[in-house]
């Protein structure tokens, strides 16, 4: 591995740093966007059962806030359960915007890495081309410098594309997953509001 880095020259280091950041973001988002810690399916039925039995209590709200992202949205709504449907819905929407922002965390950075990695590879290619042209002189060429320039050009282009492809795949995957989770939480929150205000049965 070290020999490949040596052959690619110093332009490879920004690509390596970008790849490490991308792997870190991918791992963190895979852990953070698990369904059971964002929008667990069993939470709403259990909450409705408890609400019908005991009503809203401070302990319930604290427990919801600590439970999951969906629980935080439910807690925001239940704090305003005695107010009108519109006020309860507005409080849920405000909490939902904050949750959606948290779910999007680091995805912009991952998308930027996916876009910039080929450009960093192209920069390395240009540095390699400069080395190649520098190997030619009026007295003759330098084969070692020529070979080094070719390796810098090719390795950087390859590594840049290699980092960009998985970064773009995971960026699009996480964007779609966030959109799906937000939609699911919106539907469950709307169902809670309608049931609490007597506009809908279970």
Image: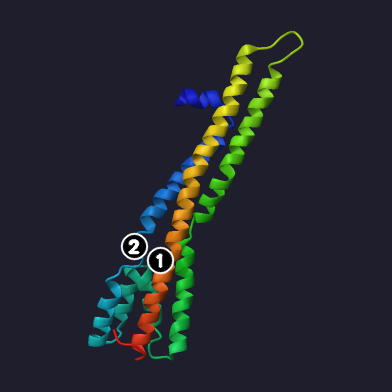
What is the distance, in whole Å, between disc 2 and disc 1 at their CAs?
A: 8 Å
Quadrant where the C terminus is found in the figure: bottom left
| Vertical placement of residue 131 versus 166, above or below | above
| Residue 105 in the image, given as x and y percentages of width and height | 48, 58
From where the camera sits, is residue 129 visible?
A: yes
- The reply, left or right, for residue 134 in relation to residue 170 is right
Task: Point out which mark residue 35 bears.
Answer: 2
Identify the element where label 1 is drawn.
Answer: helix
- The reply, left or right, for residue 53 in relation to residue 156 is left
> Which of the pair 185/11 is nearer the observer?
185
| Residue 85 in the image, given as x and y percentages of width and height | 43, 89
The residue pinned by badge 1 equals 181
From where the camera sits, is residue 12 visible?
A: no
Quadrant where the N terminus is found in the figure: top left
Which quadrant would residue 190 be assigned to in this image? bottom left
Number of numbered markers: 2
Residue under the point 41% across and 54% down: 29
Q: Badge 2, how many Cα within 10 Å: few under 14, some, many 20+?
A: few
Q: Badge 1, how many Cα within 10 Å: few under 14, some, many 20+?
A: many
| Residue 14 in the image, given as x and y percentages of width and height | 56, 37
């Amino acid at each position: 591995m070290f020999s490949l880095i040596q052959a690619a020259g110093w332009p490879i280091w920004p690509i390596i740093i970008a790849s490490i950041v991308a792997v870190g973001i991918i791992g963190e988002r895979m852990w953070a966007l698990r369904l059971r810690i964002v929008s667990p399916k069993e939470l709403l039925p259990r909450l409705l059962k408890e609400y019908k039995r005991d009503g809203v209590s401070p302990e319930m709200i604290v427990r919801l806030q600590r439970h999951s992202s969906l629980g935080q949205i439910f807690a925001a709504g239940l704090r305003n359960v005695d107010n009108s449907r519109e006020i309860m819905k507005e409080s849920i929407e405000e909490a939902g915007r904050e949750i959606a922002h948290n779910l999007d965390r680091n995805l912009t950075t991952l998308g930027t890495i996916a876009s910039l990695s080929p450009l960093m590879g192209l920069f390395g290619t240009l540095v390699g081309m400069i080395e190649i042209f520098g190997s030619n002189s009026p007295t003759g060429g330098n084969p070692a410098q020529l070979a080094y320039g070719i390796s810098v050009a090719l390795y950087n282009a390859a590594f840049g594309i290699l980092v960009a492809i998985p970064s773009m795949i995971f960026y699009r995957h996480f964007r779609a997953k966030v959109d799906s989770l937000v939609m699911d939480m919106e539907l469950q929150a709307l169902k809670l509001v309608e049931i609490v205000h007597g506009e809908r049965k279970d």
